[in-house]
Amino acid sequence: MTATSTAELAIYAALSIPNLYILFKHGRTGLLGWAYLLIFCTLRIVGGALDLSGSTTAGIISSIGLSPLLLAASGVLKEARTYYCDSLDKKVEWTVVLLFHGIATTGVAILAIGVSNLDSSNVKLSDISTDDSLVKAGIALLTLSWAIVAIVSVWALAHPAKSQRPKSSIVAGTRLLWSVLVSDVFSGIRVIYTLVALVTQDETLNPVTGSLTIRVLLSLIPELVCVLAFLIAGFVTRNAARDSSKANKAAAYIELLNTR
């Protein structure tokens, strides 16, 4: 446990540095995705530190870490759609974004309450059934959140913009979309692992105290692959916002000249 916690703490502390750089480079267009990814890295650092200190709250931190990872995926997907797909009405787009955030945050809140109550030393037998139901409801909402991101990312890839876009924007959007698709696979492994672990209450599947091999293969590695996929895509598209802005200004200038 100590070895994996130390590794997790060191890995995510190191990855937070390029994450900050990418957050700065992508600007407002990519704010949601890269900010949530930084929150995820921070939670993993905190979780590793708490686990090393023997704190019982490490399990709660481990559970709620899924939410910012899924929200990061939705944020990167939103940025990818900006470059790759036709624009939606802003009100519609932000309504969808807020609804998704509502599902994910409600899920993690319910899950955290349930896990916290079950881990409490003062838990009452009469409350176990209620807390167990909260845990199952919370992970069900997170599973739904994952499914939404997976479906929308596949749909977005199949529906490129019909209006003319700069080649650089299409390339950037494609790379970001593929990072989301890669994360869909590995975050799916992580979500399903958590779902099975919490529903079955199998000690070997416990995300904090369970089998080391299972935790590494079904938790640590899938999460790390997701983060690396995002960071690689974020780095190679670091100038996407600047290039898109230049292309839009050039197009507006040409249109202005044509109207004269």
Image: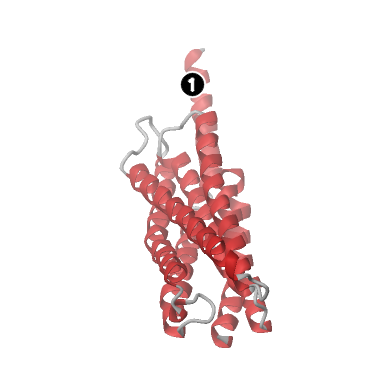
* 4 sits left or right of 180 in the view: right
Residue 17 figure quarter: bottom right
Q: Residue 119, located in which quarter of the rendered image? A: bottom right
Please tell me how crowded label 1 is: few (under 14), some (14-19), or many (20+) other residues with Cα within 10 Å: few
> As rendered, which of 25 and 38 lies closer to the eye?
38
> Relative to residue 247, is residue 21 depicted above or below?
below
Q: Which residue matches tag 1? A: 255
- Residue 169 lies left or right of residue 40; in this view the side is left
- Element under disc 1: helix
| Residue 120 vertical placement versus 113 (above, below) | below
- Tell me if residue 221 can be seen: yes
Name the foreground residue: 144 vs 240: 144
Quadrant showing the N terminus: bottom right
**What colouring style does the render use?**
secondary structure
Could you tell me if residue 13 is visible in this image?
Answer: no
Whole-percent x and y of residue 160? Answer: 35, 39
